[in-house]
């Protein structure tokens, strides 16, 4: 049987991986949001002012 320390290390490895994936996905979503929003806002304002 595996010792309790081995099971704990394996559990921490899985939890750490999940946390890294979740944090990374939020960071990617945030950068994409930052890239998308200013462009759409500028085009919306330009369209409104030109009309």
Image (cartoon, grey):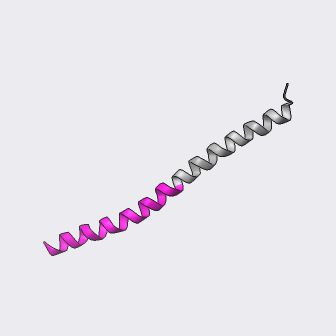
- Rendered image quadrant of residue 44: bottom left
Question: x, y percentage for residue 51?
Answer: 13, 72
Q: Could you tell me what secondary structure mostly forms the magenta stretch?
A: helix
Q: Check the image and name the residue furthest to the bottom.
A: 50
Magenta stretch contains residue 40: yes
How many marks on residues? Answer: 0
Q: Which corner quadrant holds the N terminus?
A: top right
Question: x, y percentage for residue 35?
Answer: 41, 65
Q: Check the image and name the residue furthest to the front.
A: 1
- Residue at the (26%, 69%) spot, across then down: 43
Q: Report the front residue among 40 and 6.
A: 6
- Residue at the (36%, 63%) spot, across then down: 37
Magenta residues span 27-51
- Report whether 50 appears left or right of 15: left
Question: x, y percentage for residue 31?
Answer: 47, 61
Q: Check the image and name the residue furthest to the left.
A: 51
- Report whether 43 appears left or right of 3: left
Query: Residue 27, relative to residue 38: is it above or below?
Result: above
Magenta stretch contains residue 39: yes
Query: Residue 6, relative to residue 31: is it above or below?
Result: above
- Residue at the (68%, 41%) spot, across then down: 15
Question: x, y percentage for residue 30?
Answer: 48, 58
């Amino acid at each position: 049987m595996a010792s309790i320390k081995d099971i704990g290390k394996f559990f921490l490895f899985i939890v750490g991986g999940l946390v890294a994936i979740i944090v990374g996905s939020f960071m990617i979503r945030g950068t994409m949001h930052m890239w998308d929003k200013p462009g759409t806002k500028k085009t919306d304002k330009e369209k409104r002012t030109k009309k």
